[in-house]
Amino acid sequence: MQNTLFFMNYKALRAILILIFTLASFETYSHSGASHADEEVNIYSGRKGKLIEPMLEKFTSKTGIKVNLITAKSDALLKRMEAEGKSSPADLFITVDVGRLDRAKRMGLLQKINNFSIMTKLSPNYIDKDREWISVSKRIRTVVISKNMKDKDDLKNFEDLTRNQWKGRICVRSSNNIYNQSLVASLIANHGEKKAERIVKDLVGNFARKPSGNDRAQITAVSKGECDIAIVNHYYYILMLNSKEPEKRKAADLTEVIFLNQDNRGAHVNISGVGIAKYAKNVDNANELISYMLEKESQEWYAKTNNEYPVIKDAKVSEILSSWGEVKLDELSLNKLGDLNPNAVKLMDRVGWQ
């Protein structure tokens, strides 16, 4: 009996400590309208506040629903939601990459989205098969290359990166990164695990250096001649191109984006997305905010501000994305990327992707 009580007290203490140590890293934001002051929605967001706050302010102005925003690293937010349990104030969880949304789902932290009018706006590829998350924007994981690369015409498909021609010429971040895990999951889904493992093993053999740094660091490495090819999300290149820092602009000016697999399945695509928290207290308001995020005006603001692709068909992309022309995207269901994430992580470990 004493052992049981000790174990229960230990679990409670552990949950409290997790909550205390993660609170320090959270940023909070609140905006309330003049009317419906008693109406609110609480967001836990893995995206930085500046990327979504203007849209939330417009939502409040339109609906009168107060928005309370807490931002932090996605994994820290998931730990917090888990520790808070039924007492969690979270109504919505916003994050990037389907792998993280699937993680939240596997942890039992989300509930079904029962607003079917939302579902009709999107392709089924961008909706969880159990309706526990929904996409808000699309991003392409592709390559940035040196403008001086003379053999760039030889690079058409992601699978081409396995050739001896590219040995010592590829930069990428570590296997711990969720973007890379989802990329490998897409290779498993498209090729089967055995062939995907051969592809990834040969890719790792062509790395110019031990994986380190973020996507911007990979682009910078290309600009400095440390490698010729960087595997990155497309919008990081745009962020550097538009940066206030001369060094970052210079790095972008020395490189260019190319999109792979345009003659077959299409470029690898991922998302930012949202789910309703399992213990949400303001479900109706959460549904209303999701609907607002998928309105044409919101989608176009999102595209312009973050240089990501809208998930609804009639929304326009940003000027720079428009200048790149139409990009063919892989139509693989994003559910498979979440399902295959554990397989991808194990595969990357087997082939030595650090």
Image: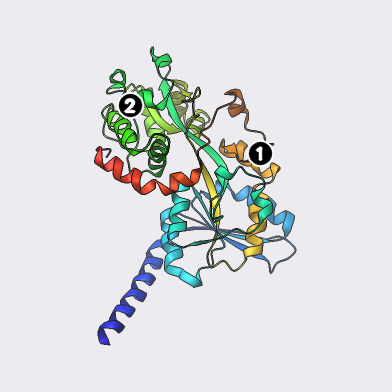
- The residue nearer to you, when weighing 322 against 135, is 135
> Is residue 110 shown above or below 252?
below
Find residue 41 and report its horizontal and vertical position in percent: 62, 62
Residue 229 seen anywhere in this rendered image of the structure: no
Q: Give the structural element (helix, strand or loop) at label 2.
A: strand
- The figure's colour scheme reads rainbow
Indicate the quadrant containing the C terminus: top left, top right, bottom left or bottom right.
Answer: top left
Residue occupying the far top of the picture: 150
- The residue nearer to you, when weighing 27 against 323, is 323
Find residue 213 and report its horizontal and vertical position in percent: 34, 38
Residue 84 seen anywhere in this rendered image of the structure: yes
**Spatial separation of the CA atoms under disc 2 and disc 1:** 34 Å
Q: Give the structural element (helix, strand or loop) at label 1.
A: helix
* Quadrant of the rendered image containing residue 156: top left
* Badge 1 amino acid: Glu
Q: Which residue is mark 1?
A: 300
Q: Is residue 313 left or right of residue 78?
A: right
- The residue nearer to you, when weighing 115 against 41, is 115
Find residue 284 and report its horizontal and vertical position in percent: 66, 63
Q: Mark 2: give few (<14), some (14-19) or many (20+) Cα within 10 Å.
A: many
Q: Which comes before the other along the chain, label 2 or label 1?
A: 2
- Mark sitting on residue 170: 2
* Badge 2 amino acid: Ile
> Is residue 44 shown above or below 223?
below
Look at 31% across and 29% down and name the residue there: 203
